[in-house]
Amino acid sequence: MSDRRPIKLGRTFASNPARARVNHLRYARYYPKWPLIWTLAVVGCAFLIFEASVWFAILLLPVLVCDLLYWMHIDRYFANGDANPGVIVQLNPTLVAVASDLTKGIGSYPAIKIICTRLQRIDGQRPMPGMHLPTVALYFSIPKIKTPHWASFDPRPIECATADRNILNRVTASFTREQIATLETSVQLLPSLQPGLYRRFDHGWEKVPDFDPSDASGVPTNVPPLIKRVIKMLVPRVDADGNEMGGVPVVLRDAPLGTYLGWNITDGRDLRPAGGQFRPFHKDQNCDYVGGMIPFAKTKAERVATGDPRLSLEERYKNHDGYVAAVTAAAANAVAQGFLLQEDSTALIDLAKASAVLNP
């Protein structure tokens, strides 16, 4: 049986199970909380049995069962949990960064977990920043919420459970050079070295749950965010009048009366009626929600007086009949290309004839 064979954990598999045997006394030294609780519970029950009544033996049995189940869980944790590479990133306290992928099999969800450890010796040496060590972790999700990735993972240094160099060397050898290189590179990009879970998003690494880019909740820790690449901005090409070129032929575009815009400028005039509640706001600022139109001057003299470089209506159409002819030609082009119905073409031409454009 290969050491890389996955081990099933409930409905999931550990891709690189640690298969480490736990020295219970060593583990209790580094994680003393629950071992101490169960030990005191056993001692307390024994004291009550000898000093008070043998009936307290009824309490001793469930305590012993709970203690046994606890150590069975720890044994399975280090035997079946997924092994991940770790690196010491800080001393006093000793902080270890552990790299993993939270994916459940679809996509990639890189993560870094920084944990605090009480290890005083690693491979017989005092811990130093940059030292690597193997860890083992179980993964968990948020109850009743289905996602393609785990919510987090709980890594623990294997050296907290065993000093067997054969086990430690075997697990360390299971890590690829790519895993180690990714860990070292990712640690350098973290916004901080505070204990917690860090996820890699499109804009860089963020500490979870300080910031959630999916809904912009929380407080970003990576400020300013990492610039991965600059996206070239594409905008429509415009003609000499500032009107967009190409696309579907539109009569209003091919026989224009001004420059048509997809934005507008907020009016600064006070348009409040007597006793009304309306007032100007954001005066002269850009408004993206309402399109605008900048009309052409009627004559050349008018546009020259205002410094308008666009041809006037007279320079374009000469007179009212010229404007109607331009509308007729634009409508015929749209009909020929299949973008305008004949009845709509006729309606547009009738509107042009009835308009006041260059109509004395």
Image (cartoon, rainbow, N blue to C red):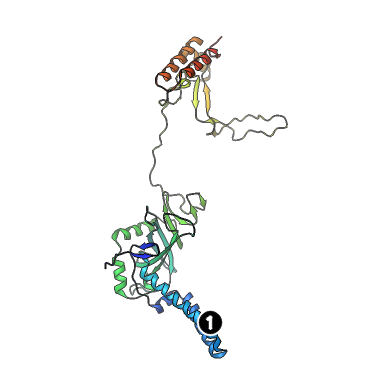
Q: Residue at x 47, y 11 (%)?
A: 322
Viewer-proximal residue, 17 or 31?
A: 17
User: Badge 1 local density, few (<14 within 10 Å), some, or many (20+)?
Assistant: some
Confirm whether residue 135 shows in the render: yes
Q: Pinpoint residue 45: horizontal percent, then vertical percent.
A: 53, 84
Quadrant the N terminus occupies: bottom left
Residue pointed to by mark 1: 59
Q: In the picture shown, does residue 217 fall above or below 174?
A: above
Judging from the image, what secondary structure is the residue with disc 1 in? Answer: helix
Q: Residue at x 49, y 25 (%)?
A: 260
Viewer-proximal residue, 5 or 33?
A: 5
Q: In the picture shown, does residue 75 fall above or below 184?
A: below
180 with respect to 256 (left or right): left
Viewer-proximal residue, 74 or 154?
A: 74
Q: Residue furthest right?
A: 275
Confirm whether residue 298 shows in the render: no
Q: In the picture shown, does residue 76 fall above or below 273?
A: below
Quadrant the C terminus occupies: top right
Q: Pinpoint residue 10: horizontal percent, then vertical percent.
A: 40, 64
Residue type marked 1: Leu
Viewer-proximal residue, 335 or 95?
A: 335
Q: Pinpoint residue 161: horizontal percent, then vertical percent.
A: 38, 74
Q: In the picture shown, does residue 292 fall above or below 201?
A: above
